[in-house]
Image (cartoon, grey):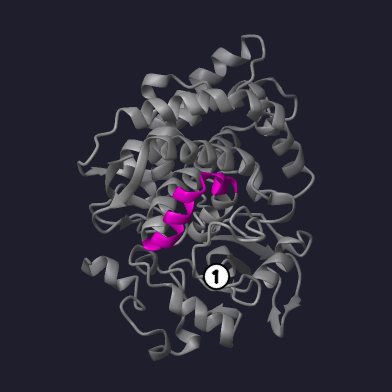
Amino acid sequence: MTAVKKAYNHMYGKDPYSIPLEDYDVSQPALFESNTMWGFFDRLRKEEPVHYCKDSENGPFWSVTKFNDIMTVEGNPQIYSSEPSIGIADPREELPLKMFIAMDEPKHGVQRKTVQGIVAPSSLAKMEGLIRQRIAEILDTLPVNETFNWVDRVSIELTTQMLATLFDFPFEQRRKLTYWSDVATAVPTPGGLIESDEERESILVNECMATFVGLWNERVNSPPKHDLLSMLAHNEETKHMQPMEFLGNLILLIVGGNDTTRNSLSGGVLALNQFPEEYQKLRNNPGLIPRMVPEIIRWQTPLTFMRRTATCDTVLRDKQIKKGDKVVMWYVSGNRDEEVIDRPYEFIIDRENPRHHLSFGFGIHRCMGNRLAEMQLRVTWEEIMKRFKTIEVVGEPVRNYSPFIKGYSELPVQLRPL
C-alpha cells in the first residue's frame, strides 16, 4: 500500500478491538480492498450499533449498522432525506450532479416513474431471450482448463452488453459505459483510474455527457422508443432537465445497471468456491438457482451503503442526531446481522427466505432494477450449469479500493467441462 493510501486508512491491518470506538471510521477504502471490514462492523453491531464518526475524509457521519435500524431510516424519508447526496461526501460546487436517487418526493417519484417501464415485468419477459442468447455466446467463447479473468470476460461483458441495450447505445462502443461507471465511483488515488475529483469531472462532462447529448438530440427528434434515453427525452417531466441533472441521472442509471449485477456475477463464483458443499448442492439440483440468486446478492452486497441527511433533530436508539447530520446506512453490515439473518456469514443457496436482505435498499428508493439484476444472474447460472462442472477460482481476487462499490477487478478462474 502506498504512503498516500496509508494516510487515509489508519484502521487498515489493525485488530478491531485495538482501536477505541470513538476513533472508528469504517468508510476507509483499504478495509474493503483487503476485505477486513467485517470485524469492525461486528463490533459496532454489538457495542454501538448507531455510531458517530467524528472525523473522516468526508467529515463526520453516523453509521447505522443493524438490519432493523437501517429499515427504520429507510422507512422515514421525511426525517432522513436523500438530498443532497447518497454518498458520504457532499456534492462539489464545481459539479453539482443531481439524480433522482438523491431526491425526495415528489420529484424523486416523478423522475423514477419516467424510466421504470423498462424494467416492468412485461419488458423483462421480452428481454430474457436476448439475455440468454448473449450469455450463451459469451460462455461459448471462453477457454476451458485455462486461466482467465472472469470479471473482464464475463461479468463486465454481460452487464455492458445489457446496458448498451437499455440505452440503445452504440454496441461497438459499449465498454465506454463500463469506463464511465468506474470513473464515477472510483476513489481518487495517485496512479489510479482517476487521480482527482477534477479529473473525474472532466471525463464525465467532456466524454460521457458530450456523447449522450448527441444521442439525446437524435432521440428527441425521432419517434419515442423503448430505451432509457428515449424515455427521458420524450417525457414532459424529464425532457427539460438541466445539464447537471441529465448527467446525474445518466450516471445513476449507468452505475445502477452495471455494478450490482457485475459484482454479483463475480461474487457468486467466489462464494461457491468458498463453500464447496453448496456448489455440490447446486450441481445436484440446478433447480435451486432461483433461490441462490438473492443469496448471492445478499452475500456480496455490491453497494455497501447509502447516506441520508437528517431534516430535523431526532433520536435513533439512544443517539441524539442533529438536523443536517449525515446518516450512513451500512447495508454490508445489516446483511451480516445475526439477530435477523441465520448464520449470516455462510453462503446457503437454499435459504428459507433468501430475499430478506438489504442489498436493494428498502422503501421508496428500493432499487428499480432489482428484478432485472436477478433475472440476469438466474439466466447466467442456468447457462453455466448446462456447460461446466465447475468454475474454479485459481488465485486471489483483486477487490475494489472503495467503501461504496464492493466488487472486483480480477477473479482468476479455470472452467472444468461437464
For the point 51% across and 37% down, which residue is it? 254
Q: Is residue 57 above or below residue 193?
A: below
**What span is colored magenta in the figure?**
274-290
Answer left or right for 364 relative to 204: right
Q: Amino acid at mark 1?
A: Pro
Question: Residue 115 in the image: x percent, y percent?
Answer: 67, 31
Question: Residue 62 in the image: x percent, y percent?
Answer: 59, 74
For the point 64% across and 20% down, which residue is it? 226
Answer left or right for 389 relative to 41: left
For the point 62% across and 68% down, which residue is it? 327
Q: Within the image, what quadrant is residue 329 found in?
A: bottom right
Question: Residue 319 in the image: x percent, y percent?
Answer: 68, 83
Taking depth in this image into account, of 101 and 157 the one nearest to the observer is: 157
Q: Within the image, what quadrant is residue 5 found in?
A: bottom left
Answer left or right for 21 relative to 125: left
Image mark count: 1
For the point 74% across and 54% down, which residue is it? 363
Taking depth in this image into account, of 131 and 175 the one nearest to the observer is: 131
Q: Within the image, what quadrant is residue 123 found in?
A: top right
Tell me if residue 275 is in the magenta stretch.
Answer: yes
Residue 255 shows up from this direction: yes
Quadrant location of the N terminus in the rendered image: bottom left
Mark 1: give few (<14), some (14-19) or many (20+) Cα within 10 Å. some
**Residue matched to label 1:** 344
Question: Mainly helix, strand or loop, the magenta region?
Answer: helix
Residue 179 shows up from this direction: no
